[in-house]
Amino acid sequence: VEGYGAEIIMVENTNEARRDTAEAVVAERGAIFIHPSEDPRVIAGQGTICLEMVEQCAEMMTMLSKPKSAPLDIVVIPVGGGGLGSGNMIALRGLLGSSVKIILAEPQELNDAKRSFYGKSMVGHDPSNPLNSVADGLKMPIGPNTWPIIRDMADDVMTVSETDILRATKLVWE
């Protein structure tokens, strides 16, 4: 990323440190902050992933001479702040309704989405949680724009162990 001219700013491993640093950059440089999961434009953009996936699955079903078959039974989407999941749940429900089961998955160490889903009320990360997970892109807690979508559109939220995350990562890279 630096090779393309970006500046990397290292911060402590807390969401507060990330927020405070982003606010300082905005104030110092006149930058515009676009939230990575709460901005409605980001949520909408994320939904294009499943739009394309549904289209490609439908094409595959046609090639297999099964054009009337549902293209997807279950979709598992990683969840951190919920932008990726929210955008894609909106797209999936709009295209396939309740015929597809949508499961969100997050690290066991960062389980605010699961606790919120089963508790039926948005909760953040436990304040004593050091946010130690190899899935660093999922450290953001769900927020007020993504929570209602998760609450109303997900069929389930599951957690995944660090060991399983590492195994899956290794499988992909090999």
Image (cartoon, rainbow, N blue to C red):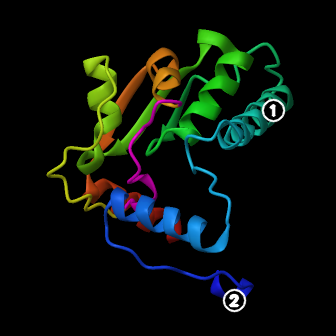
Up the image or down, 11 lies above or below 158; here it is below
Q: Is residue 138 magenta?
A: yes
Residue 173 on image: x %, y %: 51, 70
Is label 2 in contact with label 1 (beta carbons under 8 Å)? no
Residue 70 on image: x %, y %: 69, 17
Q: Is residue 46 magenta?
A: no
Question: Which residue is denoted by mark 2 in the rendering?
Answer: 3
Residue ranking furthest to the bottom: 3
Up the image or down, 163 lies above or below 11; here it is above
In this rendering, position of residue 142 left or right of residue 64: left
Residue 44 on image: x %, y %: 71, 36
The quadrant where residue 21 appears: bottom left
Q: What residue range appears in magenta?
A: 135-145
In this rendering, position of residue 88 left or right of residue 155: right
N-term-proximal mark, 2 vs 1: 2
Q: Residues within 10 Å of mark 2 (few under 14, many from 20)?
A: few
Residue 26 on image: x %, y %: 59, 65
Q: Secondary structure at mark 2?
A: helix
Residue ID at (37%, 43%): 106
In this rendering, position of residue 117 left or right of residue 8: left
Residue ranking furthest to the left: 128
Residue ID at (64%, 33%): 87
Q: Residues within 10 Å of mark 1 (few under 14, many from 20)?
A: few
Residue ID at (83%, 23%): 65
Given residues 137 and 172, the one toward you in this image is 137
The three-letter code of the residue at mark 2 reads Gly
Q: CA distance from mark 2 to mark 1?
A: 35 Å
Question: Which residue is denoted by mark 1 in the rendering?
Answer: 55
Magenta region, main secondary structure: loop
